[in-house]
Image (cartoon, helix red, strand yellow):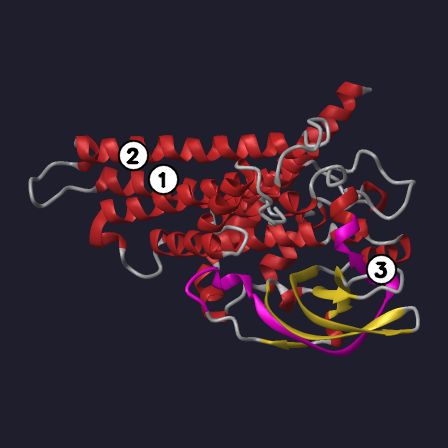
Amino acid sequence: MAIHALNEKDSVVEQLLIGAEKVGRLAEQEAQEAEKNATISENVVKMIKETDISRMLLPKKYGGPQVDLKAFAKVVRTVANYNISAAWLAYLYPLHNMLPAFLPPEGRDEIVQQGGLICDIFAALGKAEPEGDGYRISGKWSFVSGVLHSDWVGVGVMIQFPDKEKPEYCLPMLKVSEVEVVENWDTFGLRGTGSNQVIAENVYVPKERILRIEPAEATRRPPEEDYDKDYPVYGVPFFPAFYLGFPYMAIGGAERILKEFKEATEKRVRLMDGVRESESPRSQRVLAELTTEFHQAEGLMEKYMDLLINYEKNGCVTQNAEFFALRTKAIKICVDIAVRALLTLGGGALYKGGAMELFLRDILSVATHKTSLYEDAVAAYGKELFGFHSGVRG
């Protein structure tokens, strides 16, 4: 029975990885259209759905494959080998579609059974006014990735509950049809993510569709006693688990840059000395160093994943700042790989529309996300190492 279950799990993951290849290849074919339109196409979104990638973290109670976090990371990395914008959404759609797992059962059933994609923005910029058994939500939020293809949007709000002394950090789940979407995504990189702005004006949300982040973060469980003990996103620290896709996107992109660098170098003959670069110690050394640095990034994320999965087994001692530092160091290494590869290849790699240009811009853009900022991470980790509270969430 155990062997059968293992084989079934491996088969599910294999199919998801095949699907990730399909999504990535299609997104790569359409990359220039996505750059122009500032969003991946409906074709790519449809394939993310058809391959079950958008449902891969959905609890098995709702028919999802309920894969573990390692399989989730592999899927994200695979898509990123081809297109990082598509990987961004192949990461965030299944992740956000997991959020109802932390809602009360009534809200969970409503959203999951509706079947649409979920986007979100955690920045607590909204306002909430009580009304009946729910709240009226208003506010303006930017950087809402994938909103053009979503049916639901979670928005960050501080809510004052009657039984609490101070406001609580929450994520009410609104219908996208009830908010205004402002298409203002015009950026240096990650253009295909379509991370536009949403505006809510007095939108009513029942209490069962309000995700209370602080209890989810503190307990790592849903708000009920009878829950699936095997669900991989329960029992792990909420935000470190939520953020794990960003470094895997960078790793997938850096892996592609190494491939592009090697192929370009093998064809290159320098005019200054007529030496084929693949035969020159110059580029041999660069490729060797970049490859070993890439393995460092992989190793950091293996450590990250181990600390994440074994968090409770290890006594819940790993600080959020350590997760932050490990994750951002892996991303920084990938940025350094991309920059050095470009500088070594020289002007021939500058042409717009080439893989080097697109992947460099997108990896740099991953590194600008607030959860990927290396300087913030090492500052926080240093505080924790000396026994001070850093205040970071993961």
User: Residue 282: which quarter of the image?
Assistant: top left
Q: Distance between the residues labelled 3 and 1?
A: 52 Å
Query: Magenta includes 212?
Result: yes
For badge 3, the amino acid type reads Lys
Left or right: 348 as drawn, with respect to 314: left
| Structural crowding at the residue carrying mark 1, measured as other residues with C-alpha within 10 Å and reported as few (<14), some (14–19) or many (≥20) | some
For badge 1, the amino acid type reads Leu
Q: Which residue is tagged 1?
A: 258
Q: Which residue is drawn at 35% across and 46% down?
A: 338
Q: Which residue is tagged 2?
A: 287
Q: Which residue is drawn at 79% across and 57% down?
A: 211
Place of residue 210 in the rendered image (x, y in percent of width and height, measured from the top left) = 81, 61
Depth order, front residue of 235/319: 319
Place of residue 74 in the rendered image (x, y in percent of width and height, measured from the top left) = 58, 38
Q: Are marks 2 and 1 in contact (CB under 8 Å)?
A: yes
Q: How far apart are marks 2 and 3 (CA)?
A: 57 Å
Q: Which residue is tagged 3?
A: 164
Place of residue 33 in the rendered image (x, y in percent of width and height, measured from the top left) = 47, 66
Q: Mark 1 or mark 2, which is nearer the start of the sequence? A: 1
Callout 3: helix, strand or loop?
A: loop
Q: Mark 3 or mark 2, which is nearer the start of the sequence? A: 3
Depth order, front residue of 337/277: 337
| Structural crowding at the residue carrying mark 3, measured as other residues with C-alpha within 10 Å and reported as few (<14), some (14–19) or many (≥20) | few
Regarding residue 342, the answer to whether it shows in the image is: yes
Q: Give the range drawn in magenta.
A: 187-215
